Amino acid sequence: MHESMLDYAKRRYLKIAVALCVVSIIAYAWHDPLSPPNGGTWLGYTLGGIGAALILWLTALGVRKRSYSSSLGTLRGWTSAHIYLGLALIVVATLHTGFQFGWNLHTLCYVLMLIVIASGIFGMVVYLRYPQLMSSNRAGIKPDVLLEEINDLDQRALRIANEMPRRFGDVLRSNREGTRVGGSTRAILGGYDLSTIALLTAGGTPQQVSNSEQTALLDWLGDELARSADGELTKRIGDLLSVVATRRNQLRRLRRDAQIRGWLEIWLYVHVPVTLALIGTLIAHVVSVFLYW
Amino acid sequence: MRILIRTLEIGATGVAVARDRVVDADVIDFGRATDQHIHCNDQRIGLQHAKFTRSDVGLMLSCVPPAQAEVNGRLCRDATLRVGDEVNLGPMLIKVLEAPADFDAAISVEHDSRETKVADDAALPAFATSLEQVGWRKRPWAWVGITLTLMFGLILPWFFVGRGDASAAWLRASVLPSDMQWTSGALHSAHGNLEVECEACHAQPFRRVRNEQCLDCHASTLHQHVPADHPAAAGMTADRCTTCHVEHDEPSNLVQLDTRICTDCHTQPQDHGAGSKALPVTDFVSQHPDFQVSLLTAPDWKVTRSRLGEATLVEKSNLEFTHAAHLDPKGIKAPQGEVVMDCADCHTANESGTSFKPINMEQHCGSCHTLGFDPAEPQRKVPHGEPELVMQTLVDHYSRRFLSGYSDAFAPADGTTPPGASLSAAARARVLGTAKQRANQVAADIFERRVCADCHTVTREGTSAEPVWKVAPVKLTQTFMPKAHFDHAAHATGEATCETCHAAADSKVATDVLMPQIKVCRDCHGGETGTEGGRVRIASPCASCHVYHDEQEPKWVPVMKKVIRQAAVRE
């Protein structure tokens, strides 16, 4: 059975993370400083040091991920440790604050850290769930192959249209040009179809209309089919309908693939830049605390 | 089945080259896999895409689902093929040829030339299917993040702080982020004026706040916890003000109430240089010595420290007085009749209500204890002062009276002078001699039996003709417990009366010390948490009664209390 990154090495890093949390909580409960608990007691400095070291080490995953030749542990091991110790960081850093928050740089540092961790949790959830959805959607066919197939279907359709009145070729070419997969953040993540097609209006002028899910084209072909009295033409319209329907299914898959990939990636666009902002704030936090000791 | 497969390839020169091969098999495979009879390396083609088998009329095509083929321009999965039929499979065009002799079938396989043409006509638009393609970027925003936070969170404020106080102040007043963002919590309201003056305490970068910064303001009011010559003083010098007075905490806790501030040393005071008399203290309830009182003691009025409860303490003030008589609920005889007195008649609160004004004879005793001596002239009084002045007053009084013809039952028969008569020198001397005798008589009475003797210890000296009285001086202890502060006003609550703590009504001698013992306090006051000994009482850390910096309450303590109280009201 596939071992997920959460179960890596019999959950070794889960145990380490839980141990870290338990030790921190016990120390915090036992520690009774003269002043209210804060980052400046000996325990505060200790927890802060552990937290800062964790942040830098967790960030190193980004470096390790790019270094394919590294022999420093497996990538899956690093990811497992990254997740569990990243979650433990919530406990360590919160205890470091002594639950003192305010409109200041120090709390900003804490909030940025929470944003990074929250986006990481989101990433973990999608990584546990979406790859499976992705492969079941792809059914073994890669997106570039799907594209080739769509191209193929287009050629087939145009070949059929070659033997038909000119308007069919025009509409099919317009469909080909107006077909969209993704195209905007909303369309990628929402799986929306922004495709358009130019159809002739009653006045005889072409008008660009929405062709989401190839519906406009299928309707147009349906209308043509209903009007057709010529047996050969009817047969060819039927062929076109079959090609377009297949094309619609392949586009749907492609769109779903883009959507899943989008959700698999989107959190990283928060996780990575905010991590760097966090490191900047962390440096400012540590230096300023000792600057005004 | 024996089949001829003719492959047509366009060579480098553009000339089509035909290559024939003969396959002997029941099934001819078409697919992307390398073991297929007809191999097509195109992603659209499945590993095993389609099969050709023999049929009655020639060949039979069957696709492996979900694959499809285009036969003579029609999409289908299975088809019977005749000579001349064209099968379109991805990029390949397969034509059924007339089978030569000895062959069951023949096909040609060629690249579909039409495909390239159509594809060139209109390439599929590049779909923006990834977030990166619609403008999402990680790296630039990561740079923006770390640059902005470092720039505005650290470098800018640091630069301005480094340029001097004026620059730092300018930045704080501006809209730009300044070192104010480094404030981890508000200052205590007592330090509110320093809120935008970081350098007042943080004088040097990367140096902890030093005592000098505190003493800039507090030097004149601050006193040492122990005198400089005290054995424990050596251990105190290293202490930093900020060890106890921690700022920027929430909740603000500038005055440290934690018992450990004291018990760190006082649990075992001898380990910290204290003398053998210092007793261990851990907590008000669990371990605190009995109270000591400071008593002024006659005759030299040295202050002696005595522990309550160890023995019956005696306050040698030389005053003759009983609380019991004065507090008699039936009343006490006074010039104005029977008077029922209460404590406040004599013990009047000071301005702050924390303690009492000193007892004063004229104010507190004089209304009853009038110093009159002559019933004929009751308003005439001896002064409350030295016996010589008293004697002088008496001699003056009786001389005037006798010279002006005053009659007195106790006066010698020939000692008076008829009114209006003029006296010879001898007669005058005789009358004055009589007046002196009378004065001595009255003096003996008031010094030894009433008036003075009511309150004072008086001894008679001198000769019988020239008696002299000595009044033992009286001094009352004003502050019995100078090492602790106690707020009477704060205790005037509920059913608490003076008697709750001071057993005055039963005190029959002036020497009684009516200060309550620690157990009286412990009725209501607990230790640091107030939950010691299985009861819930008022939490009373050391600082509830003791101040750290001085034996006497420094002047700033009431000021501070007022500030704290006002701050509490505001909150």
Image: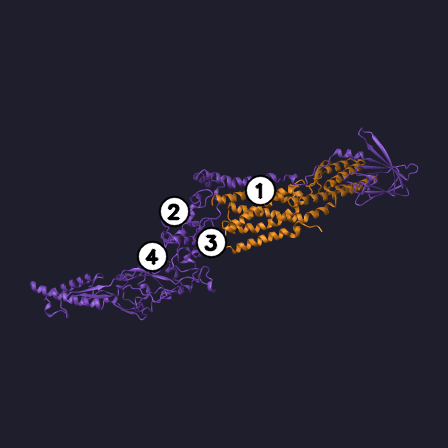
Chain colours: A orange, B purple
- Badges 1 and 4, same chain: no
Tag nearer the camera, 4 or 2: 2
Q: Secondary structure at mark 1?
A: helix
Amino acid, disc 2:
Cys
Q: Nearer the viewer, mark 3 or mark 2?
A: 3
Label 3 and label 2 in one chain: no
Find residue B223 and name its label: none
Few, some or many residues within 10 Å of mark 1 (<14, 14–19, 20+): many
Q: Which mark is residue B217?
A: 2
How far apart, in angstroms, are the residues tagged by discs 4 and 3?
35 Å
Q: Amino acid at mark 1?
A: Leu
Determine crowd level at label 3: few under 14, some 14-19, many 20+ residues with C-alpha closer than 10 A. some
Question: Which kind of residue does numbered mark 3 sit on?
Answer: Leu
Q: Is residue B506 above or below residue A97?
A: below
In the foreground, B472 or B530? B472
Q: Which residue is mark 1?
A: A276
Q: Which residue is mark 3?
A: A34
Task: Tell me how far mark 3 sits from mark 1, CA to CA.
Answer: 35 Å
